[in-house]
Image (spheres, rainbow, N blue to C red):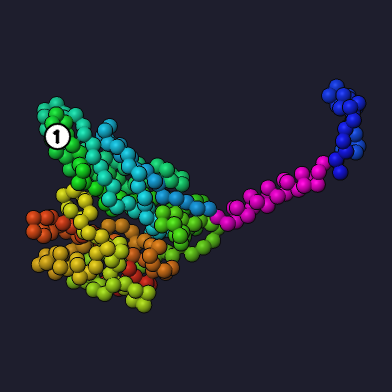
Amino acid sequence: MLTRLSKPHLRSRLGGSGPWPRQIAVLPFLRVLPLLALALLVCTQAGGSELACPSRITFSGLASAPGSSAQGMARLDGQARLLCLYQGINLQALAPRPAGGTCRPVPLQPMAGGGSGTWRFGPPVGPASVTPPVQQSGNGCLHGGGGFAITGLIAWREPPAGEVCTLHPDAPSRFLCGASGDTATPVAACPVQLQATSIPTAAWTAETPTGFLAPESLLLHAETGRLAQTNLSFRQLREAMGPAFPRAIFLLASPPFASSTLPPGSYACLYTGPRFARGRQVLAANIAIACTGPCALR
């Protein structure tokens, strides 16, 4: 019970002399506040944390290169690294024409911002720079352009020390990390090269150990990187490439990764194919093969 102070008691305390009246006691709930705070801290740490992919990509190497808001797709590779895959980042930068009057391509280094912790680009996951096409525009040089988009850009980081991470089941750009858990780490590496004739013709299903993963496959305009078609099936890939398909060789574009579109224990291998002509267009394909258990690719 908190006893009301009389005016003499108040004057005594304001003057700084004499002990506090014995009737004044600390409220019971105040005594347990430190314990509640400690319990809340322990529960929060035990429950792990959420990590988010970077939400903004900027580029160094060209002062006029603008930043871009972007949504990364959360992935896990075979070494339990956290990956964020970006598709279709538009880039358009107008720079002064250099002395000599010739516009030359400039490598740009991507940098990540807005995510959880420090993310980086480059080895061992992907390239450390991108080089957009350049053309003369008035008195300047236009790098990229309205029809240019960067695809297959991957930001990565290690999991927090002492923790393992899984893909968030409800948020495609987030990870759940804690002291324990199943990271759905791939059980086998993807082949570095893949002959077109070895690509699985059937779409991947939960009952199919190895299959073509259409939601992660797409066609690009080879010169600009602009998306030409998403959700690409094997039949559409073969028809688009025509006579170039049987002899095509696809190269591994990233480490194997787990995807929110796949169940635990399954993973995907991402490949990039050679350029090919379709009418007046020059295209290229990025394809994904999903595997459960060892990836049976020749």
Q: The magenta stretch spans which residues?
A: 26-48
Name the residue beneath numbered marker 1: 137
Image spot of residue 263 (x, y percent) = 41, 69
Q: Provide the major secondary structure of the magenta segment.
A: helix
Image spot of residue 42 (x, y percent) = 64, 52
User: What quarter of the picture does the C terminus occupy?
Assistant: bottom left
Which residue is pictured at 28% across the width and 66% down the height?
214
The residue carrying pointer 1 sits among few (fewer than 14), some (14 to 19) or many (20 or more) residues within 10 Å by Cα, namely: some
Image spot of residue 239 (x, y percent) = 15, 68
Q: Amino acid at mark 1?
A: Ser
**Can you see residue 247?**
no
Q: Nearer the viewer, residue 83 or 123?
A: 83
Which residue is pictured at 13% across the width and 35% down the height?
136
Residue 248 in the figure: left or right of residue 90: left
Q: Quadrant of residue 251?
A: bottom left
Is residue 27 covered in magenta? yes
User: What quarter of the picture does the N terminus occupy?
Assistant: top right
